[in-house]
Amino acid sequence: MRTSLARYIERIYNQPYNAICNNCAHSAGRVYKRAKRLGVRAELVLTFSIMPKTKHFPPWPSLHMHTVVEGNKIDVHLSPEQEERLYKIRDVRTCLQVVIARCGGESDSTSG
């Protein structure tokens, strides 16, 4: 992964979650767009997931989005502080996933 993309992902990861303007769809979309602009192979993935239980809620079903960049899952919807308070991103369980956009490499969805 290119250094500039890795720095960009780190910057997004450190921004706090907001249900309206900085949720998983926004974060995943921003990473995907940057990867596409840099010519890096990436996929934008929509999932049906089970979100982990929190202090106040049991596990709950949810639509969720993340990006796969050069084969690595990038899920940065919570900041490190929010992960510490709410739940670990790695604990989100994916039940079903659909690649909704793909760029870079041999299978660029924008061609033809």
Image (cartoon, grey):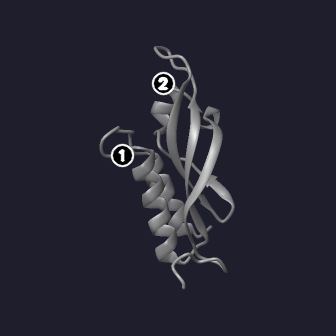
Q: Quadrant of the C terminus?
A: bottom right
Q: Position of residue 69 (x, y in %)?
A: 61, 62
SS under mark 1: loop
Amino acid type at circle 1 is Asn
Residue marked by disc 2: 85
Q: Quadrant of the N terminus?
A: bottom right
Image quadrant assignment for residue 98: bottom right
Q: Nearer the viewer, mark 2 or mark 1?
A: 1
Q: Position of residue 18 (x, y in %)?
A: 34, 38
* Residue at x 57% of width, y 40% of height: 48
Q: Position of residue 56 (x, y in %)?
A: 46, 14
Q: Is residue 48 left or right of residue 78?
A: right
Of marks 2 and 1, which one's residue comes earlier in the chain? Answer: 1
Q: Is residue 95 above or below residue 110?
A: above
Q: Is residue 112 visible?
A: yes
Q: Residues within 10 Å of mark 2 (few under 14, many from 20)?
A: few
- Give the camera-side residue of 50 and 31: 50
